[in-house]
Amino acid sequence: MKKLSVIGCGAWGMALAVHLAGLGHGVTVWAHSEEAAAELKKQRSMPAAFPGVEFPEYIRYTNSYETAVTGMDLIVFAVASPFTRKTAEAVRPFLADGQRIVIVTKGIEEETLMTQTEILREVLPECRIAALSGPTHAEEVIRRMPTAIVAASKDTELAEYVQDIFMAPYFRVYTSDDELGVELGGSLKNVIALASGMIDGMGDAFGDNMKAAMMTRGIHEMRGLATKMGAKEETLSGLSGIGDLIVTCMSMHSRNHRAGILIGQGKSCDEAMKEVGQVVEGYYSARSALGLARKYGASLPITEEVNRILFEGKSPRDAVVDLMLREKKPEMQFI
């Protein structure tokens, strides 16, 4: 049995906490407030996210960074991407050199264009860092529905350590040394999922043909940018690329897909995110993805149109028309 902490008590953090506790590990969850920690300890449930699911009574909850991270075999970072840097700075005084950390958050920091592991390495240079990513809905993981995911790190030993801790008969973990590719896949697909949701939200005028095209050209964009940045092309064809794209574009569990549907139906971005009720990572990753495209000279037409919809008030219908009327070109030009 290992001593583990999960930093963050959102749906994904709690799904992983329940998963790890069920495997026999000692799990402590850090919550953002004393009230949130006390509520979780008392209720042992999150009915809005997981109706009918009761959390194990032996999960511990705390609002203390020191209590949450001191003496842990592995720390799981599960805060929303806009808060990764701030949280890393808060826990830094309590971490031992060589502390193992795995981040399960997907996103690119808008100001620096850094991935989540890059942020952690900058703030916590003495720690060992890995990422865990793939097609994983918290609503299914917490119910032990079969899932496959990727543990990625430049530190192969750490990736295998994470694999061993998380592996279960219903939770298969692969390893990868392409940390950049795995993280980019997990971040960029959220932007494409917003676009895919908008197609669904616009109704009968746009059908399955357009949605299939959006997803296929979306993975083309993701692969094109990732390879320009030095990631492996095959990584974007794996679980953290195509796999995560498919599940995020197709499922109503996906916050990005649901937000896209609402925007396609005519609601503003603020209204859509308020109705979804959770952080919509694609909203934050859209600008970052466009910034990376400009930095590395990659063509991301879908991402450009999503940005125009989110931040310039362009209508999704006009965006689709403009995508369809782009200049003629070969399908696999970048290859």
Image: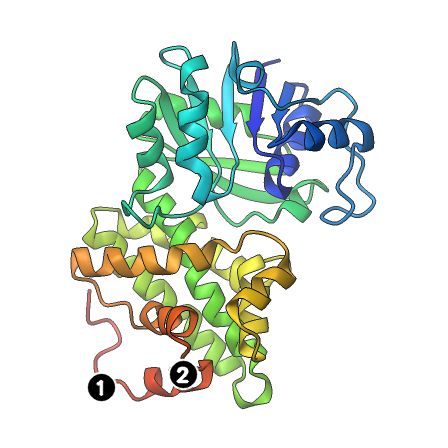
Disc ID at residue 190: none
Judge from the rendering whether residue 235 lies leftward or rightward of residue 56; answer left or right.
left
Judge from the rendering whether residue 56 lies leftward or rightward of residue 317; answer left or right.
right
Res 151 visible:
no
> Element under label 1?
loop
Mark 2: amino acid: Val
Task: Tell me where residue 147 appears, x and y as whole percent.
Answer: 59, 44
Mark 1: amino acid: Lys
Q: In which quarter of the image is the C terminus?
A: bottom left
Task: Tell me where residue 63 appears, x and y as whole percent.
Answer: 62, 24
Disc ID at residue 320: 2
Which image quadrant for residue 261?
bottom right
Q: Is residue 103 above or below residue 245?
A: above
> Element under label 2?
helix
In this rendered view, identify the residue nearer to me: 238 or 99.
99
Residue at 48%, 26% (x, y): give it.
162
Question: In this figure, which residue is indicated by the disc labeled 1?
Answer: 328
Which image quadrant for residue 178?
top left
In this rendered view, identify the residue nearer to me: 298 or 285.
285
